[in-house]
Structures are given as C-alpha cells and as structure tokens.
Image (cartoon, helix red, strand yellow):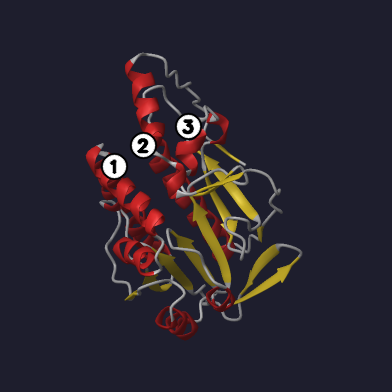
Amino acid sequence: MKIAHENGSYQAVRERHDDRLRLLLLSSDDPHHLYLRAALRARFKLVGAVVEPSRRQQARLWLRRKYIDWLYRYYHIKRQKWTGRSAYRERYFEALMANLERLPVELTPVDHINSAPALAKIRELKPDVTIVCGTMFIGRKVLEASGLCINIHGGHLPDYKGNHGVFFAYYHRDYDKIGATLHRVSLQLDGGDILEVAKPNIFPHDNDEHLYCRAVHMAINRLLARLEGFESHGQAIAFRKQEEIGHTYRHRSRKPHCDLSLWLQRRLGRLHVPHIPNTSVS
C-alpha cells in the first residue's frame, strides 16, 4: 500500500485488493502503551513495536548527567505509586484489555528511541504509518524512517505541550483544555500539525488521573477509527497547522506544592470541578 501526500492531507492507495497498511508502534511500557499495542494488533497489521522502557528512560537521564530531571522523574514515579494513581491507571487499561485478544507482537526493547538498534529495526520494518506514545523526543533519522508518524499526546495542543498537560489544565482550572491530541510528529516538541483533539467527559469527583486516562483512551479510539477509515474506506487523513501559542511543561514544572495545593483545596471544599457531560472532538 502506498501513501499519497498533498497539502497536509494523506491518502492510502491500494496496489492490490489485499493490501494493508504496515503499522509500527514506538512507545514506552506503561499500561496505556500496552493497551494501545494490543488494540492496534487486534485490528491492523502491526509489524512490530519498538519499546523504550520507562526505567531505561530514567537511567538515560542519569547517564547524561541531567540530575535534576532524573530527580523529578523519580519523584513523580513515587508520587504516582503513593497516591494510588499508578494502580488506578493499571486497573483502567487492564479492564479494557480484557476485551481484546492477546495476539503476539514482535517487540524490540531499546535503551533509547534514537539509538542505532532502534533505527535499524525501523528501517528493516519499513512502516507506512508509525504511532508514537510515551517515548523520549524523536530525532530526525528515526522520523525520516517512520513514514507517516502520528503521536498521541496527553494534553490539549497547542496550549499544553511537554509533560503533564492534563494536570496543568486541571491545575489552572482550564477545564475546556483538558484532552489528548493526535498530531504529526515533527522536530519541534509537540509542535506538529494537529489531526484532532479528544476531550473527555468531566465529572465533579474527577482528579487529573481520571481525566488523563479517559482522554488518552478516547484519543486511542479516535486513532483506531481514523486508521480504519484510512485503510479500508479511502478516507483521507488531513492535518491542520498548529498555532504557535501555549506553554511547554516539564517534569520539573510539577513541583510537590502543586499537588499539595489541589489536595488541600479539595479537602477544604474549595475545588469545584464542573460537570461537562458532552464529549467533544475538535
């Protein structure tokens, strides 16, 4: 299958009746990455998955002497565990995977996503479309070898780039900007053209983890629908240019006092999360 490209729009062109897209996944190993892998494998020709494990991402920060970044990432790993958020995320996506057939996938664990082994595997697999979720920054060589490269970003673009996008929208009471974004991968962090933004339902009892899981789940479902239409029904995938606005957050941006402030406000009855029942896609 070939992919034609013109003016930000992509079209799948069948050369034979049985042509299928060759999909590749570049991801880490969190519960939502495992669900994404299983969902892609169940519905499409997933030729492989290059996995950059979270522990190796952490180790690489230390090896590169980024000690402050290493410390904040370590803190967030522990915070997720201590607050029960990591257990919630695992339960959420494990329940979704119970409905999927566990089909085998060729896995290639790598120390980092731009390493020579990762690049060699991508070039060997020759994907038509590459899905990215949870890796470190994608470099030029990997991007050039990856075909049409689409990222699932846990935040509302262009407003919330980088890390903890859902949290900071929640923290700033910017409830209309809570979502997850499908966008083209570019050499600018979270700066590629946008396919769509998935916005979850919001309920008064929600914390940022509830909203993150629902937003990413919804974005994955939207991606599956887009790929199905692209492969089977000739529906074009069209991107729109991303505005140069918003803010980029890092792991170090989410300091302990941010979470403590939200916890105190909820305990004191001063955190009023609105009920926004209408799921929307933009």
Q: CA distance from mark 2 to mark 3?
A: 15 Å
Q: What's the amino acid at mark 1?
A: Arg
Residue 237 pos. (x, y %): 64, 59
Q: What's the amino acid at mark 3?
A: Tyr
- Secondary structure found at label 1: helix
Q: Please report contact status of discs 2 and 3: CB closer than 8 Å, yes or no.
A: no
| Mark in front: 1 vs 3 | 1
Quarter of the image containing the N terminus?
A: bottom right
Residue placed under numbered mark 1 in the picture: 79
Residue placed under numbered mark 2 in the picture: 256
State how many labels appear: 3
Pick the residue in front: 223 or 71.
71
Does residue 213 appear to the left or right of 18 in the view shown?
A: left
Q: Residues within 10 Å of mark 3 (few under 14, many from 20)?
A: many
- First along the sequence among labels 2 and 3: 3
Residue at 36 percent of width and 36 percent of height = 256
Pick the residue in front: 274 or 187.
187
Relative to 67, residue 75 above or below: above
